[in-house]
């Protein structure tokens, strides 16, 4: 199913019908990322936006560890 990413407006294919092929399974999402996406966007994101958000969460996690 084609969807529009609510973050960047690009079109991508959502694979909810075959979750093992979904973008969100291609990344090891940091703790809290799925909940953040659900509350902030309320829908699936494209791979690039998933990666950007996941990377930001990863940096925050590392930053908290260093402190």
Image (tube, grey):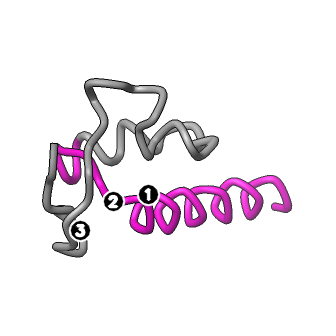
- Choose between 60 and 44: the one closer to the eye: 44
In the image, taking residue 45 as reference, residue 25 lies left or right, namely right
**Marks 3/2: CA–CA distance:** 8 Å
Residue contact between numbered discs 2 and 1, judged by CB atoms under 8 Å: yes
Q: Which residue is mark 2?
A: 46
Mark 1 falls on what kind of element? helix
**Residue 52: percent from the left, percent from the top?**
50, 68
Which stretch appears magenta? 39-67
Q: Mark 3–mark 2 contact, CB under 8 Å?
A: yes
Q: Nearer the viewer, residue 1 or 57?
A: 1
Q: Secondary structure at mark 3?
A: loop
Mark linked to residue 7: 3
- Residue at 85% x, 61% y: name it: 66
Q: Quadrant of residue 67?
A: bottom right
Task: Please name the residue that numbered disc 1 is placed on.
Answer: 50
Q: Residue 57 in magenta?
A: yes
Q: Main secondary structure of the magenta part?
A: helix
Q: Which numbered disc, 2 or 1, marks the residue closer to the eye?
A: 2
Q: Quadrant of residue 16?
A: top left
């Amino acid at each position: 199913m084609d969807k529009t990413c609510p973050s960047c407006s690009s079109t991508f294919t959502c694979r909810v019908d075959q979750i093992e092929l979904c973008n969100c399974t291609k990344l090891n999402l940091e703790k809290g990322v799925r909940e953040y996406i659900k509350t902030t966007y309320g829908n699936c994101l494209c791979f690039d936006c998933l990666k950007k958000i996941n990377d930001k969460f990863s940096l925050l996690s590392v930053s908290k560890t260093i402190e």
